[in-house]
Image (cartoon, helix red, strand yellow):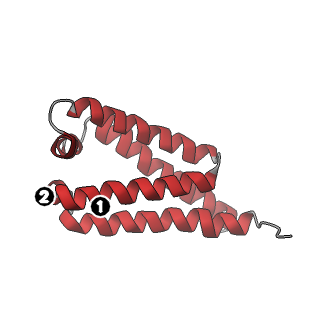
Amino acid sequence: MTTKTIHKTHTFLIATVWLINGLVCKVLNVVPRHEEIVASILGDENSRLFTVLIGLSEITMAIWVLTKFKSKLNAITQIIIVATMNILEFIHVPELLLWGRFNIIFAFLFIGFVYYNEFVLNKKLNPQTTS
């Protein structure tokens, strides 16, 4: 498999993660645990609204990933969001996470995957000339 094909596949997988988490888990509320997490951290009063807004933001992230617009900024943004979100959940609501505190391991694996796709594979495809 070529580097280009691997990069495209990784990009599609990353976008799929954002789309599934945003649309299926949050907007369509197929996984109510996500709203419970939001309610525990931000309060019950507007937890559904906040969950839908977070879901819509994740769908937007999926679209941004697929467009490859400012891909480095996109990767950095993803890394910051995933790290922040998972550290907050690790501290405040580990009992609501699918794998408890072990969730953080999967979050950092995803961060590594995003980093590798953008800053290793994409760099191989688009080498910068330094002068």
Q: Residue furthest right?
A: 131
Does dot 2 land on a helix, a strand or a loop? helix
Res 56 visible:
yes
Give residue 109's mark. none
Q: Relative to residue 62, is residue 128 depicted above or below?
A: below
Amino acid, disc 2: Glu
Q: Which residue is mark 1?
A: 87
Residue shown at 54%/56% (left/top)? 75
How packed mark 2 is, by other alpha carbons closer than 10 Å (few <14, some 14-19, many 20 or more), is few
Which tag, 2 or 1, sits closer to the chain's start? Answer: 1
Gap in angstroms between the C-alphas marked 2 and 1: 13 Å
Quarter of image, res 104: bottom left
Q: Position of residue 113 (x, y in %)?
A: 49, 66
Q: Measuring 71% from the left and 69% from the top, which residue is drawn there?
A: 124
Q: Amino acid at mark 1?
A: Ile
Query: Could you say which is closer to the camera, residue 30 or residue 82?
Result: 82
Rendered residue at 45%/39% (across/down): 59
The residue that mark 2 highlights is 95
**Element carrying mark 1:** helix
Front in this rendered view, residue 130 or 4: 130
**Is residue 28 something that shows in the picture?**
no
Q: Is residue 60 above or below residue 95?
A: above
Q: Nearer the viewer, residue 109 or 92?
A: 92
Horizontal side of residue 79 vs 50, given as left or right: right
Q: Is residue 99 left or right of residue 70?
A: left
Residue 108, x across and y down, in percent: 38, 67
Mark 1 surroundings: few (<14), some (14-19) or many (≥20) residues within 10 A = some
